[in-house]
């Protein structure tokens, strides 16, 4: 796995990016256009950074000052989550992520990784970061090198993803899904959207986009231990002027076909 890009779920630090994916067309032009907008915004960000005198560039240890998000709401006053040095540990069988405001039940034998194993050693400002996480190994050294993993991650949605409030959560969830799907998973697979609907987490408005990834063909050819993954992107609105919470989960079937449903059913506001 290469550093330099966002760490990706699947293998340890995630699998390399997949070369092509038809998912931008699953939801029509809107999600595809949002992803294009994200790319443009990221490009503008890096162009602007390249014109800054070298002497004024922050070191990796400095806190990055986010530019205004491409959304209709005012920018959040919350500090960026770049400096996560410790992930919350289970208490009473639950992970409570104080930064995102999400709490969920930890599946049996899943463990909290090191922050660098989730976000990388030097995460880019445009990268979605995670402030709560648990993982489990689906197959160690499945390709002779990396581990294929299951993951449940939580955090605040990166400001580069447009967010106009609770009424627009469905569009934002689709954009995140398309973006993640075009980046993650090198292995050939088919994708199916299982659910795409509003939900409640406690008394808070939320949205769940649940999907299934089918690796059966390549798994049978290579003798991998898993064939499918059940996954979900969940957004939870946190009120006016605040970035929403996000949970991203992807669970290979050899870790349990009921794990995702149990985690989704256990979600609570922190």
Image (spheres, grey):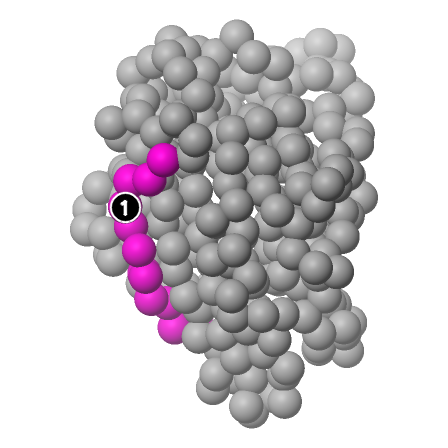
Residue 118: image quadrant is top right
Q: Position of residue 45 (x, y in %)?
A: 50, 24
Residue named by callout 1 = 197
Towards the viewer: 194 or 126: 194
Residues in magenta, as a range: 188-200
Can residue 253 be seen at all in this image of the molecule?
yes
Q: Is residue 126 left or right of residue 124?
A: left
Q: Which quadrant of the figure has residue 64?
A: top right
Give the quarter of the figure containing the N terminus: bottom right
Classify the position of the C terminus by image quarter. top right
Question: Local crowd at mark 1 within 10 Å, few (<14), some, or many (≥20)?
Answer: some
Does residue 134 show up magenta in the picture?
Answer: no
Q: Is residue 115 above or below residue 220?
A: above
> For this view, does 135 lie left or right of residue 23?
right
Q: Which residue is found at the position 52% from the left and 8% from the top?
A: 77
Secondary structure mostly seen in magenta is strand
* Residue pictured at 61% horizontal, 46% vertical: 105
Is residue 195 rendered magenta in the image? yes
């Amino acid at each position: 796995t290469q550093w330099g890009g966002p760490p990706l779920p699947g293998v340890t630090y995630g699998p390399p990016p997949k070369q092509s994916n038809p998912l931008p067309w699953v939801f029509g032009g809107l999600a595809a256009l949002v992803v294009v907008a994200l790319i443009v915004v990221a490009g503008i960000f890096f162009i602007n950074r390249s014109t800054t005198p070298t002497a004024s560039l922050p070191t990796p240890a400095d806190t990055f000052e986010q530019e205004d998000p491409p959304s209709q709401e005012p920018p959040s006053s919350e500090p960026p989550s770049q400096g996560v040095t410790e992930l919350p540990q289970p208490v009473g069988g639950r992970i409570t992520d104080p930064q995102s405001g999400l709490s969920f039940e930890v599946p049996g034998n899943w463990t909290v990784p090191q922050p660098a194993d989730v976000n990388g050693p030097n995460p880019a400002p445009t990268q979605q970061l995670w402030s709560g996480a648990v993982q489990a190994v689906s197959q160690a050294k499945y390709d002779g090198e990396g581990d294929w993993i299951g993951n449940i991650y939580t955090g605040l949605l990166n400001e580069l993803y447009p967010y106009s409030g609770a009424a627009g959560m469905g569009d934002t969830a689709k954009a995140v899904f398309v973006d993640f799907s075009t980046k993650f998973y090198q292995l050939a697979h088919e994708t199916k959207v299982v659910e795409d609907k509003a939900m409640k987490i406690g008394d808070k408005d939320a949205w769940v986009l649940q999907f299934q990834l089918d690796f059966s063909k390549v798994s049978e050819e290579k003798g991998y231990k898993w064939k499918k993954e059940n996954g979900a992107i969940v957004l939870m609105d946190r009120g006016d002027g605040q970035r929403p919470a996000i949970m991203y989960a992807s669970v290979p079937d050899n870790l349990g076909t009921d794990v995702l449903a149990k985690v989704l059913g256990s979600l609570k506001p922190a």
